[in-house]
Image: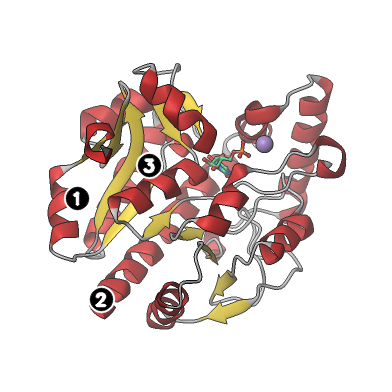
Amino acid sequence: MLKDFLEIKESVQNALAEGKPVVALESTIISHGMPYPQNVETARNVERIIREQGAEPATIAIIGGKIKTGLNDDELEYLGRNGNVIKTSRRDIPFVIARGADGATTVAATMIIAALSGIRVFVTGGIGGVHRGAQQTFDISADLEELARTNVAVVCAGVKSILDLPLTLEYLETRGVPVVGYRTDELPAFYTRESGLNVDYRVDTPQELAAAVKTKWELGLDGGLVIANPIPEEFQMDGAVINQAIEAALADASKENVCGKDTTPYLLAKIKDITGGDSLRSNVQLIYSNAALGANLAVELAKKS
Ligand code: PSU
Ligand code: MN
């Protein structure tokens, strides 16, 4: 039974029962995406921002073999400090649970658990995608497959240029996943607002966004959406600086033969080191901005149901 595996925090359960807006958050970003203590501090601030916008936050993870939808403060701290948490995507979920282990959920796994919990909106920083060189390595994030099948709207800051942006867009197009620009016609590239690539649709208000999301699912068009919210202007990085850091990080990864699930965390940590922490500052700020938008979307969706 689902309830044997899944524990929904009381405040989240109450919000869901009352049809109030709830926003899911991932935990790989905490355990593998940022260093301690900034990771825990950011996670707490994100939850606060979501509450301030009138929605209930639910950070998702697996702790001691139990799926948690909604973490308390101690659990957030534990995840952020503990170096042994397993990066958990779709295929890892049953094993992490069966072993009674701790798992930090990726975008894919968080979407699955959000959907099981009845949550339709999920906020993160960046999604996984088609990696550069995927023509050779086949490295395509399971996040993209999940977006194709699971009904959760994912608010992010676009696609990070550690990935191949044009190929990621092609993949999403093939799998029927809408890529929506929030107040932009361009796909944002995470650290920067522009990529030179177009999104499918631009929306300018949370109301407009909610109307499209609701229509998609009412028609039975299963799968998620990528809602790309550009990093606020003042926190944007210099394009040349960040691209140089990314190139250097990619070169190191290839020299050290990093592959599989280690690739993304490796690149994120390298980029942070190379930019002397500047990338981390941008990363934190874009998540705050996404948190506000995700909460606004959840509020509008709740009004419509
Ligand atoms: N991109 C980021 N920060 C992150 C991740 C991606 O800017 O923390 C994490 C997310 O949890 C995402 C995962 O789901 O990496 C993708 O990993 P992979 O490429 O191995 O699928
Ligand atoms: Mn991969």
Q: Would residue 233 be visible to someone looking at this image?
A: yes
The residue nearer to you, when weighing 264 against 18, is 18
Image coordinates for residue 130, horizontal then vertical, percent? 72, 48
Image coordinates for residue 79, horizontal then vertical, percent? 36, 26
Which of marks 3 and 2 precedes in the sequence?
3
- Vertically, is 246 above or below 225? above
Could you tell me if the residues under marks 2 and 3 are in contact, i.e. CB atoms within 8 Å?
no
Binning the other alpha carbons within 10 Å of mark 3 as few (below 14), some (14 to 19) or many (20 upward) gives: many
Image coordinates for residue 60, horizontal then vertical, percent? 34, 40
Judging by the rendered image, the residue that carries numbered circle 3 is: 42
Nearer the camera: disc 2 or disc 3: 2
Residue at 64%, 43% in the rendered image: 141
Q: Is mark 1 within 8 Å of ligand 1?
A: no
Helix, strand, or loop for circle 1? helix
Q: Amino acid at mark 2?
A: Ser
The residue nearer to you, when weighing 121 against 230, is 121
Determine the residue located farthest toward the right in the rendered image: 136
Judged left or right of residue 18, residue 58 is right
What is the quadrant of the N terminus in the image?
Answer: top left
Q: Of the numbered discs in the image, which one, if any, rests on residue 85?
A: none
Helix, strand, or loop for circle 3? helix
Q: Amino acid at mark 1?
A: Val
Q: Would residue 102 be visible to someone looking at this image?
A: no
Judged left or right of residue 305, residue 133 is right
Judging by the rendered image, the residue that carries numbered circle 2 is: 305
Judging by the rendered image, the residue that carries numbered circle 1 is: 12
Total number of numbered discs in the rendering: 3
Image coordinates for residue 58, horizontal then vertical, percent? 28, 47
